[in-house]
Image (spheres, coloured by chain):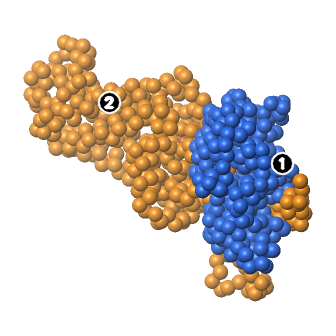
Chain colours: A blue, B orange
Amino acid sequence: MAELFAAGQKPEVLFWVGCAGSFDDRAKKITKAFVQLLNRANVSFAVLGTEESCTGDPAKRAGNEFLFQMQAVTNIEVMNAYGINKIVTACPHCFNTIKNEYPGLGGHYEVVHHTQFLKKLFEDGRITLEGGKFKGKRITYHDPCYLGRANNVYEAPRDLIRKLDAELIEMKSCKEKGLCCGAGGAQMFKEPEKGDKDVNIERTEQALETQPEIIAAGCPFCNTMMTDGVKNKEKEGAIAVMDIAELIASAGDL
Amino acid sequence: MEYLPNILFVIVLIAGIGFFARNVKRLSRNIKLGKDVDVSDNIGQRWKNMAKIALGQTKMVVRPIAGFLHIIVYVGFIIINIEVIEIILDGILGTHRLFAPFGTVYDILIGSFEVLAFLVIVAVTVFWIRRNIIRVKRFLKPEMTGWPKQDGNLILYIELVLMVLFLTMNGADYQLQQMGAAHYTEAGMFPVSQFMAPFFDGMSISSLILVERTAWWLHIIGILCFLNYLYYSKHLHILLAFPNTFYGKLVPKGQFQNLDAVTAEVKLMMDPSADPFAAPAEDAAEPAKFGASDVMDLSWVQLLNSYTCTECGRCTDECPANQTGKKLSPRKIMMDTRDRLEEVGKNIDANKGQFVDDGKQLLDGYITREELWACTTCNACVQACPVSIDPLSIIMDMRQYLVMEQSAAPTDLNNMMGNIENNGAPWPFNQMDRLNWAKEE
Ligand code: SF4
Ligand code: SF4
């Protein structure tokens, strides 16, 4: 972003990579897949790079409003200085926080999730897909809480899966009733409380009931949780956990 | 002596309504113990939500069986109340079936009340079977023992008895009409209670009148008692569902409130021109307590939520933490809040209008930390609640208290927050490596 700004250019959209997308080895692959698609569609985009900092979501959900607001205000200052209007992100937590909680602190942007952004690229004919290698595959989609219930985005990711000509099979609890993967509310960063089972195992079992070949997710944290769940069930050889962006990017064998 | 029944009736009525008014006053006093929140926005949308969710029962039918049965009881309750108007007027004026001159309209009304009363009996029976024979899982959680369990069944018994009394009164009346008893002019249609004839077989007019009068009195006294039972019961939702859906959350579920008190301090810290050693302004309020450890720290809407909760357990049933055996149950969060609020209310009553510290609070006294930390903030409970209750907001406020007032977060979370503070990410990575992905293959 700094380079574009220095050159007096303004990108179409800012890609908010997020901490998982920047640092987590699995999530970095999602980041790269999405960037591939942005390039394929000739979208001019920028990233904040080292000027990006955690949105503060896990701090806020853990109850640390101070730390959250410090993070938020810092990020807003950076983005406002660059005159950012439109943001796309592959993380529903970043999406929710920037879209809903930043405006009250002075950060007003149009924020879309990458599945919504990709859907629009398809609609505008900027990317196309014919058949591809997922044709007829059984894919089940796990709704991230912060995309689905939190923000009522249920259809964009499903529309994209349909574009793959794949067979979309719903789990017994989906959309409004979708079961959490167990990562939200800062749970990702702590050991679970005592119980009979981990949440991600429960959700993985629901996913396995659909006998999928692929479990699709739209969140780097859900991805981790479901991947762990599949490994726990020793099914990692047969079932892949993939982000929607990865599915689209690899469908056409780029 | 002729007016004795009328006088008696008026006394019973005034006592019933008077006692109810006292309960309402106490209820509203307790709710107002909560902090003020501005809910004056989007009035139009709020009315719409109330019409849809409370009046239209849209969220009840997400679970079709319970939803359908509930609509029968709900519609029955509202419509049969038209009959209560006649009963009250009859009682005051000493008349019998005052509205009878409406003729056919009256016949149809009485007829439909009877059908509804019958359907309510069926629905209530099925509800009882679900709770006690089929033992639907969500009614059997640990928080549903003792009073809450009794309360659930008691409501069903009362409704059953009221409907049976209503039909008995009509059945006896119908027989009396057939027999041409004085005052019992032919009026009404009795599609259900006419089949009660075998019970009245061979009874004299005077014993039929006794049955009819007894059922009539017990029915109206029963209704007044039920009205006063509400305050002590989860059945309060029949009144509070309306304001509660009106004041329900309008912003996206994922949007958690930003604390203004924190914003002010953060602004000060970030402002390079602010003098950190400046004396606080004269009018500065005393430093706000962050988050909630007791009911007075919650907002009045959250307290209204707690009184509205009907303990249906749909929230708990959908809760991922609860489903996997954790202690957290969003229904329990609501029930605990109400119980503590009642305790505080009683404390105030006992101490001449002043709350005297009782060494207890909602946190630890009712809701444990283990429950609070098990929440994934997934909003499943908020989505599931048929009367727009937000258990998650209470969990979040209490977490804020734990972290900001007590620094009592689990160690893992403290590490995570330390990382954000130092590295701008929840993991211990170097901020300068943020763009490394772009260079990797
Ligand atoms: S938000 Fe928390 S309490 Fe509510 S359903 Fe999810 S995990 Fe349970
Ligand atoms: S909070 Fe709502 S869903 Fe949960 S028990 Fe109470 S009324 Fe039912």
Asked if the residue at label 2 sits under 8 Å from ligand 2, the reply is no
Taking the spot 21% from the left edge, 41% from the top edge, the residue there is: B86
**For discs 1 and 2, the disc positioned in front in the rendered view:** 1
Taking the spot 53% from the left edge, 24% from the top edge, the residue there is: B132
Q: Quadrant of residue A233?
A: top right
On the image, the x and y values in percent for residue B164 come to: 33, 26
The reply to whether callout 1 and callout 2 are in contact (CB within 8 Å) is no
Taking the spot 26% from the left edge, 23% from the top edge, the residue there is: B192
Q: Quadrant of residue B149?
A: top right
Q: Secondary structure at mark 1?
A: helix
User: Which label sits on residue B117?
Assistant: 2
Q: In the image, is A136 to the left or to the right of A254?
A: left
Which residue type does callout 2 highlight? Ala
Q: Are marks 1 and 2 on the same chain?
A: no
In-front residue for pair B421/B138: B421
Which residue type does callout 1 highlight? Arg
In-front residue for pair B51/B390: B51
Q: Which residue is mark 1?
A: A26
On the image, the x and y values in percent for residue B115 come to: 29, 28
Q: Secondary structure at mark 2?
A: helix
On the image, the x and y values in percent for residue B155 come to: 45, 34
Taking the spot 21% from the left edge, 25% from the top edge, the residue there is: B190
Q: Quadrant of residue A70?
A: bottom right
Classify the position of the N terminus of chain B by image quarter.
top left
Looking at the image, is B301 positioned above or below residue B63? below
Q: In the image, is B157 to the left or to the right of B251?
A: left
Looking at the image, is B169 positioned above or below residue A130? above
Figure label count:
2
